[in-house]
Amino acid sequence: MIKFSDEFTFGAATSGPQSEGNFDKNHQNIFDYWYAKNPQAFYQFVGPDTASNFYNSYQSDLPLMKSAGIKALRTSIQWSRLIENFETAEVNQEGAYFYNHVIDEMLANNIEPYINLFHFDLPIELYQKYGGWESKHVVELFAKYAEQCFKLFGDRVKYWFTFNEPKVILDGEYLYQFHYPLLKDGRKAVQVAFNLNLASAKAVGRFRKILGNTDAKIGTILNLTPAYPASEAMADKKAAEFAEDWSNNMFLDPAILGSFPKRLTNVLAQDHVLWHATSEELATIAQNTVDMIGVNYYHPFRVKQPDISPLSLTSWMPDIYFDEYDMPGRVMNVDKGWEIYPEALYNIAINIRDNYHNIPWFVSENGMGVADEERFMDSDGVVQDDYRIEFIKNHLTALHRGIAAGSNCSGYFVWTAIDCWSWKNAYHNRYGLIRDNIHTQVKTIKKSGHWYHDLSANHILK
Ligand code: BGP
């Protein structure tokens, strides 16, 4: 039996583009655009147009979430819904009406809103006109949009986040071709990494001006994938060191410490791919660090020395310095293709405690995506998802050890509340505590949702 403190928050996470549906939106984001252009890129041709219909059903979805024990909900505002004119950040009134009501309904249900400003959903116009995050002009437009959000909703929202998983923007859009525009360009990825860090810092700066004298807090949400070497061999350890800097520290360091890891910038400079940055921009990053961090954790990052030398003639990619390593005997979620390794959550807790000023943080996503959950439905239509309960339990157990060791973690947000649309995978893998029948939009609490309700009521993990 493990006891979590009374202050510990049991929540859930989702995002605007994955839950709302496209209803009444004036602008397309990159996923809306990509789906319209190439629906076959998405599992069973299912796009983001309906998602889990949150736009129309938030008034009934939120009480359902409450019944599943969710005390705080992290979701995101869609830039393409809230803003009418991206240059001036003029607000779209219908968009503002929607988010105002969602926030009010959350509060009415005693669900604390955790609001994120960007979850992969770049307005397509900004890519077409400026190259999206490759452009510093877009960085400035993001800061203007953030400012509007703080002004519109800052009277009720206490927890703000600039980005979700900036690293995945690099991976999906600029390196490994799983998000539009499907590029493979290591040099651009490096610049985008800098620009995203700058955009986050600029938004933090606007936050300090507008909400700085309130009790509101701002952070960023990072997917941390601790890098473990395949062996104790020096070459494997070096590979893991680079993977750690590239995947985790390139975002953790500027967000919390205000500067980039020297070990990484040295390599990038030596390879002639280091980003363009002015001293003024570096000062903006130094001066605008966050109050807290959200950590999305799903799987570890096991690496070994690359099969071919980094000196080989090839275009620059970060993985000239490491190969991924499939550890024999690892526990897998085969449906998603991710290793299950709860211990990493303990390692993350200790890393934040020891290397990042023990900054306040929480698990902003963790969960298990499983295909064909009808397999596990009982005669009442309730998914008997014992595997999900087991997954959450094991991760909470590792996390609790980190907290007992002094790490400043204040909550656990499961991904996700209601089954939602998962990018290219659409509805292939389901993560929810609540099942969504996507044909009827009837939503039913799974066994894990009932279990989570008891957990969040008692704070006791049995
Ligand atoms: C995270 C994203 C989420 C969510 C989750 C599950 O990287 O922040 O948006 O989608 O992963 O992954 P997937 O949807 O690819 O199964």
Image (tube, grey):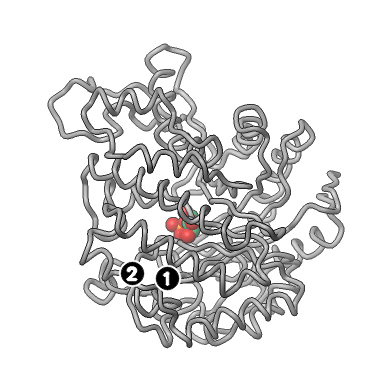
| Quarter containing the N terminus | top right
Q: Which residue, given by chain and number where applicable, does mark 2 sit on?
A: 123
Look at 52% across and 87% down and name the residue there.
440
Residue 196 higher or lower than 325, as above or below: below
Quick check: is the Cβ at mark 1 less than 8 Å away from ligand 1?
no
Q: Quadrant of residue 180?
A: bottom left
Q: Secondary structure at mark 2?
A: loop
Residue 46: which quarter of the image?
Answer: bottom left
* Residue in front for this viewpoint, 10 or 113: 113
Percent coordinates x, y for residue 335 in the rendering: 46, 54
Secondary structure beneath disc 1?
A: helix
**To which residue does mark 1 refer?**
79
Using the image, determine if residue 120 lies above or below residue 397: below
Residue 12: give its label: none
Task: Name above or below for residue 196 compared with residue 246.
Answer: below
Pick the front one: 18 or 90: 90
Q: Using the rendered image of the protein, determine whether residue 335 is visible from the camera's viewpoint.
A: no
Side of 147 where 212 appears, left or right:
right
User: Hey, which residue is sitting farthest top in the picture?
Assistant: 234
The disc labelled 2 sits on which kind of residue?
A: Pro
Q: Residue at x 45, y 71 (%)?
A: 78
- Mark 2 surroundings within 10 Å by alpha-carbon count, few (fewer than 14), some (14 through 19), many (20 or more): many
Residue 270: x and y in percent read 25, 22
Dot 1, how many residues are within 10 Å of its Cα: few (below 14), some (14-19), or many (20+)? many
- Nearer the N terminus, badge 2 or badge 1? 1
Kind of residue at badge 1: Trp
Tell me residue 154's x, y (percent).
Answer: 62, 69
Q: Residue at x 36, y 74 (%)?
A: 47
Residue 212 at least partly seen: yes
Q: Nearer the viewer, residue 334 or 103?
A: 103
Q: Are marks 2 and 1 in contact (CB under 8 Å)?
A: yes
- How far is disc 2 from disc 1 in space, using C-alphas? 7 Å
